[in-house]
Amino acid sequence: MTPEKQTRFWLIGFAVFFAVIWLLSEILFPFVAGIALAYLLDPLADKLENWKWPRWVAAGVLTLLAVLSVVALMLLVIPLLQNQLVELSGRIPQYLETLRGQAADLLATIQSQLSDADMGALKQKVSGAAGPDIIAWVGGVLAKIWGGGVALLNLLSLLVITPIVMFYLLRDWDRIVGTVDGWLPLRHAETIRQQVSQIDEVLAAFVRGQMTVCILLGVFYAVALTLVGLDFGFIIGFGTGLISFVPYFGMLVGFVAGIGVAIAQFGELTPILLVAAVFVIGQFLEGNFITPKLVGDKIGLHPVWIIFALLAGGALFGFTGMLLAIPVAAVIGVVGRFGISKYKSSSAYLEETKTENSGDG
């Protein structure tokens, strides 16, 4: 097969893959979730298998433990979150009214210090900003994610379909990998195995490590904000930790929500500063100790690339797209770096240097 035909073959394959994801995105979530859980727990299944456990027994035990963990989460944590969410929704009008009054006082103070011309220019700049457009776009993305994922995240898909997919994939994981490995073109098999190994390393470092980071941050923020005395500190802190897999975005959302509730609740500088200090300390611990220790610096995924991948996946394919975003980003990153290394060793990159050297001689 010529290089042109190979390129055409892979382009058609990728186009078909994305078309299938696009058409079936509304029903793929439980299957993608099962694949993700099987990938995460495969190392544990391998360890149990090394301890002379039959593979199907290891897969069944891990699947059962995963289901029990989800049920325990639903029974223990979700009621607490639900109660705080209900109470928070009831207090939002009061908080908004308080913040509106404080904003009006601040605006009056600013207005007293500026001329009418300065106020007019300030209002014109604010009204001409792209804020409403950005808010509308983010709202559209969130609506797409909600419609494509949460509507399908029901008891059936969570407790029936996903565990079934997870069990069979865990049981047959090595067989599936061996089968796919046998399909590789013999001429490029070793190169492909090396790239897949790097992709696995990136995914393992990010997904498995980042999951632990999110849980630790959620516990820290929830406990610290509760001790400070912030209303709904548990739900704000735990939610901040859970969305910290999006670099900087999780902390920023939690910081804005926490400071907003603190301003409306306390109205004094000291407790507001304490709430801000919790997020500063959490960000410091994450950046200097937790993430370097658990994730490391070998993931090769830039924070901006992760944010873009998650938003693009959510906008295109809903919640299923967000689950697929990081694996796709890892594949593109590894393949892109491999392509650049090949390009830098090719005549297309080195030709000018060779020409210059021959001219100097």
Image: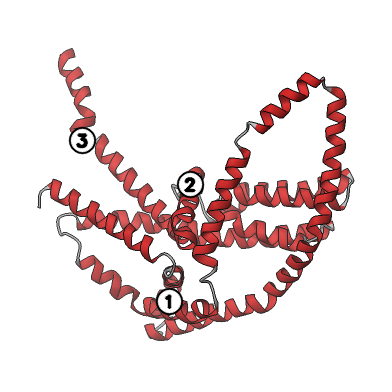
User: Badge 3: few (under 14), some or many (20 or more) residues near its Cα, within 10 Å?
Assistant: few
Query: What number is the disc on residue 11?
Result: none
Q: Nearer the viewer, residue 50 or 186?
A: 186
Which element is circle 1 on? helix
The quadrant in which residue 242 appears is: bottom right
Residue at image point 15% right, 59% down: 186
Q: Nearer the viewer, residue 176 or 123?
A: 123
Of badges 1 and 3, the one in the foreground is 1
User: Quick one: which residue is furthest to the top in this view?
Assistant: 360
78 with respect to 24 (left or right): right
Judge whether 76 appears above or below 20 on screen: below
Which element is circle 3 on? loop
One can see residue 217 in this view: no
Query: What number is the disc on residue 166?
Result: 1
The quadrant in which residue 111 appears is: top right
Which element is circle 2 on? helix
User: Badge 1: few (under 14), some or many (20 or more) residues near its Cα, within 10 Å?
Assistant: many
Type of the residue with mark 1: Met
Q: Which residue is mark 2?
A: 308
* Residue 286, position as x, y percentages in the image: 63, 51
* Residue 199, position as x, y percentages in the image: 37, 55
* Residue 61, position as x, y percentages in the image: 48, 84
Q: Nearer the viewer, residue 33 or 176?
A: 33
Residue at image point 52% right, 76% down: 158
* Residue 296, position as x, y percentages in the image: 51, 51
Q: Earlier in the sequence, mark 1 or mark 2?
A: 1
Type of the residue with mark 3: Ser
